[in-house]
Amino acid sequence: MQQVLNALQLGSVYALIALGYTMVYGILRMINFAHGDIFMVSTYVGFFAASFLLGRSLHLPNAVVFVLTLLVAMAGTSLLAVFIERVAYKPLRNAPRISAVITALGVGLVLENLTLATIGPEPRILPQVIPRINLSLGGVSVSAIQIVILAISAVVMFVLDTIVRKTMTGTAMRAISFDKSVVPLMGVPIDRIISITFALGSSMAAVGGILYGIAYMIDPYMGIRIGWWAFISAVVGGIGNIRGAMVGGYILGFVEIFVAAFLPSTYRDLIVFALLLVLLVFKPTGILGVPVVQQKV
Amino acid sequence: MKKRGMPPLAKRWLTPALLVAGLALSILLPQLGVLNLYLQQVIIYVGINIILTISLNLVNGYMGEFSVGHAGFMAIGAYVSSLLTVLLFPKVWGPFVFPLVLVLGGLAAALAGLLVALPSFKTRGDYLAIVTLAFNMIIKSVLENIDAIGGPRGFMGMSKLTNVASVYIWVLITIVVLRNFVFSNFGRGVLSVREDEVAAELVSVNTRQTKILAFVISSFFAGVAGGLFAHVLQFINPKSFTILKSTDVLVMVYLGGVGSITGSILGASIYTVLLELLRPLGVWRWVVGPLMLVVLMITRPRGIFGLRESRWLSPPEEVEADAAATG
């Protein structure tokens, strides 16, 4: 039971990051390999925002500091992602798809090493804004951090799902992912929708980043580590599918925690990737994915 | 048509003569002490990276698929060849069995390539990327968990069998084999898969077989490169073959240009030498390097030599067709 809780905690973070991969893929058919590093940058934005707010002796209550940190991280990361999209990906929209993917890999490496060069490789801890208390519910100990993580990710994912399903912007996103050449002719501002997608996806990563930061240590390499896992979550759930990414994130969280609970931790990667391969052989488009139809005959 | 300056006899012998001269230089220069050990090492790395880049270009450039696990095949070649030279053959045999050992390492990698290719070419596109990524991670994880070959500590005891001459020869073999493959019937099939798989199928290209063959050949050379790498460093551990190593090779492929052997040679040489030159920058060189890649991709999305080939590597009839077309 304790492990279930840990798995949900980790799974929430994976799910939130996986959303960014899957949204961008849904619209641009492009694997945004820089997304993991955007997540990493968001935790550092959060780290400096929280340190700044606490260091000014403003005597803000912790909850306010936490919410402000979250908002600053979301805004900062969105700006960064939209900037990257405009500068690096937009010129390549009509180039071979792979060029954009390689550019994304390059952008990710730049972000990671820039952080490494300016901030340094040592792991850091976000200032303690959530009290480290444990409640005991029927023999299971639940920390305040876990409650915050689960609650916030549930709310954020619900909001995102609603945006994509109910609003005009969401409709436009789904339309673009359905057909990119006709939809602009119907008066959909494609550039703005793509920017919004990047902004939304990276704010999800920022939420994931802050929630990760209050529970674990942060370091510049985690973008790659966590990013790949989130990417695999998106694939497991069916890349391009928003609910699939959420499902995939929790599945990976469970697999990771339970493998680590029963086997030496070195077997973790082996088992996760073997499961992934087995899944892909039987269901190549992921759990909730739709089969891709070969176009252009 | 106007002949280019040289008499035919001299032209026929020029390339082989240059190649032999290159071989002689690669043996003599280190012997005479013209190249110090550091320079030799850099040249060897350039050579190994050329082999890796050309072989990955076959899958990613010529075939238009997206494989991201090249370091996994390299790891298999490195471990198999190291185990053979250290455990099976007596040390004094080293230099004589080394080519055989490299081929065996390559074959092991090719077998792994076949196992990866069989299920993953059922669907097209990004799923190969995911399967090869998973493969890369699994190989690293397996190597870390087998204690008999050192586990995470790595494996050592190889003698330094790789030298400039052997790398030179293997680079030549790679170039010749892959060039001839690309311009063969099978190679044309590979290109047609990239351009339009359905159309290729309609003109009776066996796309599945073509894709698997190209992937297996690519894995073989990755394995050979791994063997060469293991015997120059004399120490390998699973961490040398992570997804980062695969990313390096990807960068070299796309820097040099997709679908071009000339491009791969350029890309691998430029990237390797550049990272050495930037060494004084410390951590910042890992910022400058990828940043240049991003800028290059935005300004030249196909890479330096994308989809073009130098005249020296093209078959004669294509050179003439080009000359006729441009007048």
Image (tube, grey):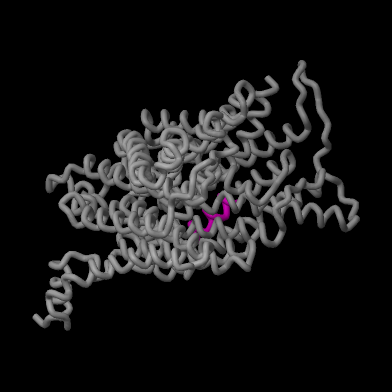
| Residue located at (68% from left, 34% from top) | A150
Residue A197 forms part of the magenta stretch: yes
Any part of residue B263 in sight: yes
| Residue located at (46% from left, 30% from top) | A274
A219 to A187, vertically: above or below: above
Residue A201 picture location, percent across and down: 56, 50
Residue B191 picture location, percent across and down: 23, 54
Q: Quadrant of residue B105?
A: top left
Q: Residue furthest top?
A: A138
| Residue located at (37% from left, 55% from top) | B166
Residue A154 picture location, percent across and down: 63, 36
A156 to B34, vertically: above or below: above
Q: Residue furthest front?
A: B92
Residue A286 forms part of the magenta stretch: no
In front: B177, or B156?
Answer: B156
Magenta stretch in the rendered image: A192-202
Question: Is residue A103 rendered to the left or right of residue B212?
Answer: right
Q: Quadrant of residue B285?
A: bottom right
Dominant SS type (magenta): helix
Any part of residue A97 in sight: no
Question: Is residue A76 rendered to the left or right of residue B169?
Answer: right
Question: Is residue A77 rendered to the left or right of residue A32?
Answer: right
Q: Residue furthest left?
A: B1
In front: B280, or A110?
Answer: B280
Residue A256 picture location, percent across and down: 59, 30
Q: Quadrant of residue B317?
A: bottom left
In front: B42, or A138?
Answer: B42
- How many numbered circles are shown? 0
In which quadrant of the rendered image does the N terminus of chain A lie? top right
| Residue located at (81% from left, 57% from top) | A52
Question: Is residue B222 rendered to the left or right of residue A2?
Answer: left
